[in-house]
Image: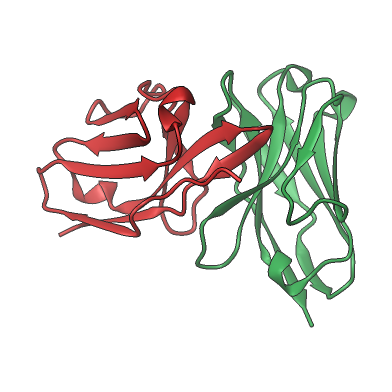
Chain colours: A green, B red
């Protein structure tokens, strides 16, 4: 059974940092492209970052570029998101999601809540 | 930047057909997928590659994509289909989501 479990969320002050983790099981992690998607309270889905299965290609949304860093550790079957210079508008539930063959998210984690307070 | 536009809300009576649109420039040249999201839960993929249903998704969910518009159709809508629905596409190395449509089953 495919499972994605996020952790690392919490309350942080403006300008602070957090590192999110996503531990996966039930599939060969190294073979799949992965993403982070977030959802602010009461708002829609916002994609924030992609990493290829090799880690050689990485993309970011304009809203987080230069502040967030995506990475992966295939040996640990884990995906990470380092978030720096956090802003109030970064408050959201953060999901890790697996990319299917043609750019769709076929599996999602349950999400982890990040709250940025001023 | 590439944008996807959805109506904020759609209402449908039980057993009737609901259609949710997603519009974007030349969207028919891209693969579109759709997600269903219920309160407090992560999204669930209901349609991918324009028309395909993942395993476990009921046959009443179908999709199409042509020109500038993709459409999610729910035939014989049930009360349990009440949820938010999001379209999504891939453009220029970015994932783009539509703003979401709240489907109300009256």
Determine whether B94 is above or below A54 in the image.
below
> In which quarter of the view is residue B70 placed?
top left
In x, y percent, where is residue B57? 34, 29
Front position in the image: B28 or B42: B28
**Quadrant showing the C terminus of chain A:** bottom right
Front position in the image: A35 or A5: A35
The residue sitting at 60% across, 33% down in the picture is B91
The residue sitting at 80% across, 55% down in the picture is A8
Residue farthest along the bottom direction in this orientation:
A118
Position of residue B78 in the picture relative to residue B33 (left or right) = left
Front position in the image: B29 or A117: B29
Determine whether B49 is above or below B10 in the image.
above
Number of dots carrying numbers? 0
Position of residue A106 in the picture relative to residue A9 (left or right) = left
In x, y percent, where is residue B32? 45, 30
The residue sitting at 70% across, 28% down in the picture is A25
In x, y percent, where is residue A59? 77, 37
């Amino acid at each position: 059974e495919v499972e994605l479990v996020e952790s690392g969320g919490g309350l942080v002050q403006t300008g602070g940092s957090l590192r999110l983790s996503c531990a996966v099981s039930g599939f060969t992690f190294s073979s799949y492209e992965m993403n982070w998607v977030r959802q602010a309270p009461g708002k829609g889905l916002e994609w924030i970052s992609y990493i290829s299965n090799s880690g050689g290609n990485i993309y970011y949304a304009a809203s987080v570029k230069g502040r967030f860093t995506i990475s992966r550790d295939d040996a640990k079957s884990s995906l990470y998101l380092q978030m720096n210079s956090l802003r109030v508008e970064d408050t959201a539930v953060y999901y890790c999601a697996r990319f299917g063959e043609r750019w769709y998210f076929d599996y999602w984690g349950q999400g982890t809540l990040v709250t940025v307070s001023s | 930047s590439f944008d996807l536009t959805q109506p904020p809300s759609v209402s449908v009576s039980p057993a009737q057909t609901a259609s949710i649109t997603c519009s974007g420039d030349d969207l028919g040249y891209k693969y579109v997928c759709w997600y269903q999201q219920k309160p407090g839960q992560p999204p669930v993929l209901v349609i991918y590659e324009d028309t395909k249903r993942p395993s476990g998704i009921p046959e009443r969910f179908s999709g199409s994509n042509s020109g500038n518009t993709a459409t999610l159709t729910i035939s014989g809508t049930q009360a349990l289909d009440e949820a938010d629905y999001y379209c999504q596409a891939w453009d220029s190395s970015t994932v783009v989501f539509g703003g979401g449509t709240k489907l109300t089953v009256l």
